[in-house]
Amino acid sequence: MQVLLSLLFVAAYAAIALEHPLKVNKSASALLGAGILWSVYALYSQDAVRVNTELGESLMGTAQIVFFLIGAMTIVEVIDAHNGFEVLTERITTQRLSTLMWTVGFITFFLSAILDNLTTTIVMVSLMKRLLARREDRLFFAGIIVIAANAGGAWTPIGDVTTTMLWIGGQITTLAIMKGVFLASMVNLLIPLAITSYLMGSQRVEAPHRGGKKNLTTTTRFESGLILGLGLAILVLVPVFKSLTHLPPFLGILLGLGVLWLAGDLIHRKKEEEHKERLTLASALTRIDMGSIVFFIGILLAVAVMEHSHILAALAQWLDNTVGRTDIIVLIIGLASAVVDNVPLVAASMGMYDLAQYPTDSFLWEFMAYCAGTGGSILVIGSAAGVAAMGLERIDFLWYVRKISALALAGYLGGAAVYIVQYQWMH
């Protein structure tokens, strides 16, 4: 049974990794894989009660992640509908290209830590189209934005879906991951920024011709600022809610969603329906990326079969016997995330290693959060942020390999070295 399940999982994984050549959506592959794996597992085990109990446990863990993601994505959509991000980005006025890159890099880094790396990448790459006229400049900035977004998302529990998974799963806690991984993530960003700004020298920003300001008649500046502040506050306070109540994070995000919904209805209550329709939270729910949500459901349930059938435990044992060193194993997992999606990689790792052997906030889990979160920057297809930038700016895969991959790899290895030294010094 284990051999058959392994082959089926590898086939589903390959279909996910080869989504673009196959022209088959990875969500479809994940759902098919989950359904087939659970069916085969149930038929071979011949213990319906035990299988249904295991499925219920897996579904509960999956649902917590999915509910959290739905809430976070909806909040971001509401902020965007109110042009909230314009309040931040319109203040960028520098005329020197290298200075602009440092500014954009740091804004992306910290914005990604509060929102998430995918949304931040979309916002910042879209902004570059209004700040930079030369396509080559925009491509370079898009590459740096991908690195900065992934680095920023790795050091907070809400900045990257893989870190969120580890947080909800109990592998990491909020303050520990922020203190432990922040410096490594910052180095991951600083190395590419320093190299790139040196190469740019004193080049000037060539701004595009502006055809007029964006139409903001549907929202006032007060409304934009209020929704932005309230939305960011909700996202930041979710870890505080978890610490105070000891309830799962998804309940905190749903509570915040209710508060934001109420606030939106109150400030727009006097507007006509056609003017406020897009601004409502109900409308935002229709615009979130449900394809990604379905993908997470499929891949997490598929990985759960591998955990319950003890395949992942056997794989962990094999890695320990073959490689031996935990830091090298996690580094390899991070490099692998440049080629394949980091969500199933981290989900598999969570099933491979037991919390009894590797407790909460141990070296393995913190280093996993860093490596899986930032390793995807090495190739443009290795992270959701990279794929989004690739679509928005039509980035060529080989161009990214030539111009950005070495920078991302240098940052990845530099940050990893800093984390290892820091951990040894603190422990």
Image (cartoon, rainbow, N blue to C red):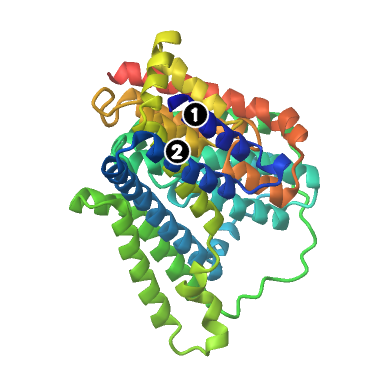
Q: CA distance from mark 1 to mark 2?
A: 9 Å
Residue type of the residue flagged with mark 2: Val
Earlier residue among tags 1 and 2: 1
User: Which quadrant of the structure image shows residue 329?
Assistant: top left
Q: Position of residue 307 (x, y in %)?
A: 37, 32
| Residue appearing at x 52%, y 82% in the figure | 276
Q: Nearer the viewer, residue 412 or 136?
A: 412
Q: Position of residue 159 (x, y in %)?
A: 45, 45
SS type, badge 2:
helix
Q: Nearer the viewer, residue 422 or 402?
A: 402
In the rendered image, the quadrant that contains the C terminus is top left
Q: Position of residue 293 (x, y in %)?
A: 49, 53
Residue type of the residue flagged with mark 1: Leu
What is the crowding at mark 1: few (fewer than 14 residues within 10 Å), some, or many (at least 20)? few
Can residue 262 be seen by looking at this rendering? Answer: yes
SS type, badge 1:
helix
The residue that label 1 is drawn on is: 4
- On residue 40, the disc is 2
Can residue 350 be seen by looking at this rendering? Answer: no
From the viewer's perspective, is 8 left or right of 250? Answer: right
| Residue appearing at x 53%, y 30% in the figure | 188
Asked if residue 318 is positioned above or below residue 408 in the image, the reply reads: above
How many numbered badges does the structure rendering display? 2
What is the crowding at mark 2: few (fewer than 14 residues within 10 Å), some, or many (at least 20)? some
Extreme residue toward the left, this view: 245
Q: Are marks 1 and 2 in contact (CB under 8 Å)?
A: yes
